[in-house]
Image: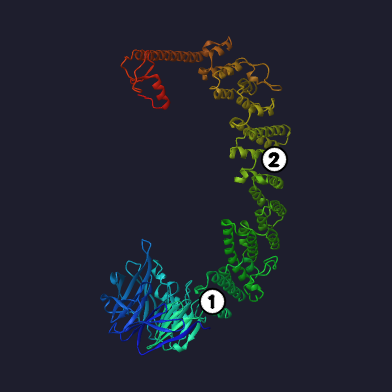
Amino acid sequence: MHEAYNVHRILKQGVQIESIAAYGNNVILGTRSGQLIMYSVDENGAVDMLMFNKNFSKKAITQMQVIPAEHLLFVLTDNIVHVCDISQVGSNFTFIHSAMATKGCTLFGLDVKPTKLPTGEMTTVIGICCAIKRQLQFFYWKQDKLNNFDFNIELKDVPKALCWVDDAICIGFKDEYVIYNMLASNPEKHDLIVTSSSQSLDPCICRIKDNMLGVSKDEFLVVIDPSDYVKKRDDKLKSQSIIEAAMGNVEIKNKPQPMLWSSALLDIVWDDPYVIGRVANAIEIRCIEGSSINKDTLVQSIPELSKTKFLVRSAKGIIFAAAISELWCIRMVDVPAQRQILLQQKKFQLAIGLTNISEEPDDIKTSTIREIHMRFARELFANKQFADAMKEFEKAVADPYDVIRLFPNLLPDQTSKSIDAAVPAPATPPLEERDMENALLALIEFLALARQKEVVKLRDTKSTSKSLLSIIDTTLLKCYLQTNDSLVAPLLRLNQCHLEESEKTLKKHAKISELIILYQMNGKHKKALELLKSHASVEGSSLYGYDRTIKYLQQLGSPQLSLIFEFCDWVLKESPEDGLRIFTDNFIEVENLPRANVLDFLLSRHKALVIPYLEHVINIWKDNNTLLHNVLAKQYREKVHNLLEEVKKDDETANKREAEESLKKYREKLCDFLKNSQNYSPEVVIKDFPTNELLEERALILGRLKEHEQVLAIYVQVLGDVEKAAEYCEANYEHDKNIFAKLMKTLLNPSRQPPYENVTLHPDFLRPNEEIILSLLNKYAEKIDPNVVIPLLPDEMPASSIWNYLEVVLRTELMEEHEHEITVALLKAEIQRIRREIQAEEKKYVILTEFTVCPQCKKRFTNPPAFVRYPNGEVVHLSCHAKNAQSGSGTSS
């Protein structure tokens, strides 16, 4: 306890006080005989009467309320509300208005809201709620009178207490409290708590901090949040739930617990940060901050004011108390004096609350509050209330380094930086093992918030140091390793951890996978890859195998190409198929690797993987690079050649069958590639193909070079495949109309020498094959020139055998001749039409006389004239036409 308020006796006079109101240093008394008296009280207790109205009413003044901003005093007497002007001292409460519509009123409450007008000016909107019998009626103050609202609320009983807070009205009956939501179209009633369970006491309601309500229940002050009942929500609290919450059986977040007093509460007022309550034998000052049933909230007891009947707050730190015929002024002791005592008593929250309302300069107030938060945090930490301690450190904007130093073994050098010397720190006992986890969890939460703030500073203002982030992240790493190691990897992926310290810590805890992440995020790729390689063969290791190495190499990208080549080697040797994913998986980093460099590497170190790599690049990634296509053609050719050699020399049946299957597969691949790829260079590729084997493939390349005679010679004379030769002619007929004639020449006049050395001619085509020749003549008759073919036909071949061919040829010739004649006739007709149009145009003439004027320049034509005639018949000078043509405004009609 400490002395928070000083008490000054103001008056002891014969009038019987029935009500009291106050503002600033002024207090207004309403007497039983209907008098109004205003006194001014200075800081030393000196009293000066400012106004006195002896005959304001013939009845007792039962309630008063002041609106200082508008200099208005609302007075309830004889069950009618009156309004007075108190703006001028000596006016003796100038009467403004008597609201006869309020007749029968026993209690009223005001709602005063400063409001900004559309013009930008500030005004005060005043509403008044009057309890008239079992009804609430509403009025508003405008143009010096109270005006009726259109609605009222029916009540179950006559109210004993009333308080209007924003959009809610709290009512105290003799047996319960209720609250009405005024935002609803029809005011919604919500039951709160019963007023008393054991005593017959009048209810009392007071507005306390943050627009909360305090209501009395026996020896308890119960805090109610009106917004819980104003919000539109489906989960309305039931009456019993409210009672349980109010009595502490149910915890409601961010709401103070009911406050216990020495005896039943008779009256209460709020003076931040204190609640002043009138009890049976004294006036008690209590602190609501952090209150609960089990905590002593008593700050000061004033037993000499046990006879008081009325309490009213006048201004910050000024309260007036009155008995039947006595008046006291209760003034708050200076904040610095209170704060010094509170800090000695370790009542930090109350000291902060007082400092917040003090009139000290803002910079001093801020530094003082920070100092108190720091002291409070260290005290909580010493008492092993770690979570609360971290919250206070956060409020104090404490340096994370100083907080980390409270923990052993989290910093590599505990003496490298001094703790805030301005804040005396209590001796911190060493943390026991059972407390360490709770302490670390609280520290993690604090550091996570501190890290967010530092990252924002670094990103937005560049005003923070990365060294602090390094300390925070390294400490978080150590905390996670001791509490929840599943959070280590996410932290390392976005971290500023100190490399050496983190490396040492992770090795100590045998966190190899996390160590890889640390190396990766710090650009130490070689160390990471060496670690991966060393653990790849350790059974039971989290890094066993090569999958992690493959994924790591895939993420490096082109800048680390030499490192990729260095460490992919062992993977490609152990598992070539999986290892090739380093260069073929669908990742942007992999696709962007320089393919020529990768190809060179594979050609020099892993030639067996060249074909699958190029197949992926060309077929999947659709690479059109000529070099890659040429190399793939060469690799296919080499593969086929090797398989051919293997088939020739292998005598084992199983191996030979396998080699033959592979040979068939790769020859098909080679042929498909040579036929479909448009990006290889045939003149380059053909140099790698021998002339004594793979002649079908050679024919495909020669076809790309348009060497038709050579292609047909290979198909007919060597391979004996007339069907493929015919297909080739069909595919190239549009480019060479004589290609079928060349095929017929090859068949009718077969060469006696093979097209290449060491090549055997096909025996079926050493002489003309009449059956095949006639078949081709009949099938492709319209595409074979008879002038070329007929002279080559054997003399002994009967004419009847080629009758069908000749018939088709003649029909084709006649049709072409007929089309030619029709075309000539059409062209002649078109020529005649055009001549007629020319003659019609030539017949048109223009007569120019000495009176003809140019429509452009309005001048006559000279002799001989130079003019232009437009299609519409208009004639202008040639020079005028040229000017119009240059300006783009010439007529087109």
- In this figure, which residue is indicated by the disc labeled 2? 602
Q: Earlier in the sequence, mark 1 or mark 2?
A: 1
Q: Which mark is residue 308?
A: none
Q: Kindly tell me whether residue 613 is visible in this rendering.
A: yes
Figure quadrant of residue 443: bottom right
For label 1, the SS is helix
Residue 610 % position (x, y): 67, 39
Q: Residue furthest bottom?
A: 14
Q: Relative to residue 724, is residue 177 depicted above or below? A: below
Q: Amino acid at mark 1?
A: Ala
Residue 142 % position (x, y): 30, 69
Residue 632 % position (x, y): 65, 35
- In this figure, which residue is indicated by the disc labeled 1? 351
Q: Kindly tell me whether residue 217 is visible in this rendering.
A: no
Q: Residue furthest front?
A: 90
Kindly identify the residue that appears in the image at 57 percent across and 64 percent down: 449
Image position of 584 (left or right of 273): right
Q: Which one is in front, 342 or 806? A: 342
Q: Which one is in front, 479 or 161? A: 161
